[in-house]
Amino acid sequence: MEILFAIIIGVLYAAGIYMILRRSLVKLIIGIILLGNGANLLIFLLGRITEGAPPIIPEESKVFLEAYADPVPQALILTAIVISFGLQSFAIILVKRAHKVVKTDDLDEMNATDEDS
Amino acid sequence: MLTAILLGFLFAFFLVFAGRFFKGKLAVVSALIPLSLFIYFASFIPRIASGEVVSKTYEWVPSFGVNLGFSLDGLSLLFSLMITGIGFLVYVYTSSYLKNHQYLDRFYAYLSVFMGAMLGLVLSDNIISMFVFWELTSISSFFLIGFNNTSEASRKSALTALGITGFGGFSLLAGALLLGSMTGTYSITEMMTMKEALAGHEFYILAVIFIFGAAFTKSAQFPFHFWLPGAMKAPTPVSTYLHSATMVKAGVYLLMRFTPVLGDTNFWNTTLIVVGGITMLYSAVHTLFRTDLKGVLAYSTISALGILVFLIGLGSQGAFLAAAVFIIVHALYKATLFLVTGIIDLQAGTRNVTVLAGLRKVMMPVAAAGFLAAISSAGIPPSVGFLGKELTYEASTHSTGMVILIVAAIVLTKILLLYAGFVAGIKPFTGRLPEKFTEAKMPDPLMWVPPLLLAILGIVFGIFPALIESYLVKPVVTALGKDASDIHLALWHGFNTVLVLSIITIVVGILLYFILKPSEKLENRIGKLEPVSPESILKKLTYFFGAFSKFWTNVFQNGYLRNYVTTIILFLVILVGYIFIGNSRLVIDHTKLSQITAYELAVTIILIAGVFYTVFTRSRIGAVAAMGVVGLAICLLFVFYSAPDLAMTQFSIDTLTVILFVLVLYRLPKYLVLSDYKMRIRDGILSLTFGGLISLIALQVLAEPVNSDVGDFYAKNAYIMAHGKNVVNVILVDFRGTDTLIEISVLAIAAIGVYGLLKLRVKSSDRPN
């Protein structure tokens, strides 16, 4: 399964970068989201994947008695997902506003710092 | 001694608050600062003359070996006295010259900072602190040259001067650091003891080049000389003080200071003789073609600096003696001539030497000062200039090798300098007074006394050379590492070669003065050579540099996000790919991998299909929906592989994102394919390579052993210490609680931003049409 995981990650990265290289702002955001998903899965895979053993201590015990998945990558990814949501929502709203002001979705028409140039 | 150096800075700081009191009649009071410093340094004369070296060290950055080490020997003393003595006269003169000027207080502040920096420079024994003061002189000189900041020419020449001398400053720093690493000390006194080791060191040449770079730029040696004539845009007191008597001699000082450390080698001497020789001749010839009094003086100053560098290059006891005397001579007569020029400029309203004449009738004392300075500059007895010239000739006739060439060069230079001195000091005062100058008035005594005093000193020292002999000149020669006990200064040396040369100089020079009149025609003639002058070449270089950086910026900072991303990714792929191919041994241990079940395969296929649909669909809503599918597939992967918390989070966030997208995006324009086919192929190849590389790296990392100490710690202590059974939760809210709090704040800020953007009303006037 690890090999499949690696392929999925590669596909997500490739698609993310490809979308970031497009001229449309919406595609840019989609690219960032795909790239973020790829990064999350990469962290998940590199923390080693374990099947059917969530890091939750059994009801009757105080410590783990058998093998469990590493909780640290999971904590990291959880944080990353939430933060990327903050980024995505801000970016989506920003695109909306930018579109309202400059009437375009094309990045090439937004490449100057001043509005009038 | 520290107080003495800091006094200038403190006074400048004081002027920030009390400046308005020093603008009116009180301005002249500020001259007490240099006067008291002059008296302070003069009090050291007997001790220094007896061979003592006064030194004092204050710790500054002891861990780097940077101390404020000051040492006062003959050389420093001579310069300190010049700085404070001429400084005093310039302060007095300025109070009248810039009378009621709006920014007189600023002027005094800059001048005081400059004086402090200059004193620090000549007294420093530590090269690093010397560098700091060196830069301070450049900076204060920048403000002084650009003092008339409403004039564009003035600002430009201030920038040029700062550019050139700033470059020299870098060179000095480089030299200082190199010397520091070669010798293990930053103290110049300590370096003197390692002279032999230094001369044989592999970096010797490089260190010397750095020191030369600093000295030649500061002392306006060819081809860095052109900033000095430009700096004449400054008010005349500045030209007097900085650009003839003190700052430009800092380079000469540096060379003299390092003579006992780096001198006496073939490279050192030859370079100095050649550069000094070219400079003195080149700029002496230039004086013939100038009609602006200050222009004449500027070029004759450069020429004099060339003579000094040349003398240091000769390197004999006689040459050092001549240099020491000539520094005094030059400071006295050149400062006088500048001050006189300032008076003429102010009273007659012009500095054009072709129209100035007959001014003695209105300002006799000024004429007297000009005349005395001119004969000192010409080296006519009984002035001290005669003494200086005799010693210079003496040193050059005793030089080793190429005597004829050296003597010819120096005699020619001296003849031309005589001409320059006469043009500046005598020409404006002789002849008939033209009609238009009858209005000119006698200046304030505050203005004519300083130049007259300096000029008279030039004669007094000439008649009684004993006055400077043991107190000023001998200690300098000692400081340069030569025995000074047999030196005896006198006007009359008997009838010898040197006297013959002197007579030739004076006769030819005076003839030249009477035959050749400065005129516009001559000035225009030299103007034709402008395109090949070092100044124009440097300007072209600067222009080329600017154009190149503009081009470079346009290539890389082109404003297209995708070009930036392409560059970064391409670089990353090449770099990582290169390392990877070189070092990777991709071995996958199949026994360690987990099995692939049918539903996992199905999820993977759905995921990849979703990604492809997202990328290639023409419908925006389709893309967003497919992206949602991808997110949910990832969610399932989290479920399979023991991450229920992640699955829940991913599920809710993914749903929210899709909803947000759909809500916001239905208003956007058509979802177009904006780039052409070729571009998409190119980007596709780049992204696939990058993705493939990431996959390979992931597999490579999997082959390495894993360390789970951190995870184990949390798992072990989750219940015992934090009383929670879901370890991921416990990590987030307990062990790393502060991080989570900050994360929540970030989200809150994003939420505020979203809210602000939604509420923002764009005024119709702000919208482009």
Image (cartoon, rainbow, N blue to C red):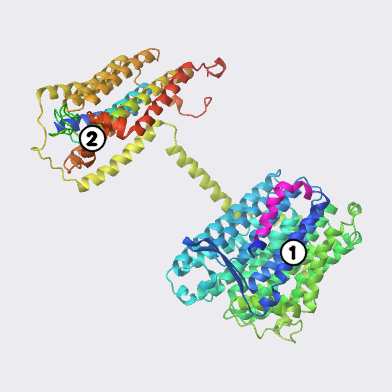
Q: Amino acid at mark 1?
A: Ser
Q: Any mark on residue B720, and which?
A: 2
The local secondary structure at tag 2 comes to helix
Specify whether A99 is left or right of B76. left
Q: Position of residue B517 (x, y in %)?
A: 79, 62
Identify the residue shown where x is 48% and y is 66%: B179
Identify the residue shown where x is 49% and y is 62%: B62
Q: Any mark on residue A113, and which?
A: none
Quarter holding residue B332:
bottom right
Magenta part of the protein: which range? B5-22
Q: Is residue B365 above or below residue A39?
A: below
Q: Nearer the viewer, residue B440 or B511?
A: B440
Specify whether A100 is left or right of A71. right
Residue B12 on the magenta segment: yes
The local secondary structure at tag 1 comes to helix
Tell me the crowding category of disc 1: few under 14, some 14 to 19, or many 20 or more residues within 10 angstroms, Cα based: some
Tell me if I can see residue B97 in this picture: yes
Tell me the crowding category of disc 2: few under 14, some 14 to 19, or many 20 or more residues within 10 angstroms, Cα based: few
The answer to which of marks 2 and 1 sits earlier in the sequence is 1
Q: Report, in whole angstroms, how far the alpha carbon at label 2 lies from the one at label 1.
A: 78 Å
Q: Is residue B647 above or below residue B141?
A: above
Q: Amino acid at mark 2?
A: Ile
User: Which image quarter holds the N terminus of chain B?
Assistant: bottom right
Q: Chain of mark 1?
A: B
> What residue sits right under mark 1 in the picture?
B36
Specify whether B767 is left or right of B565. right
Q: Position of residue A16 (x, y in %)?
A: 29, 28
Q: Chain of mark 2?
A: B
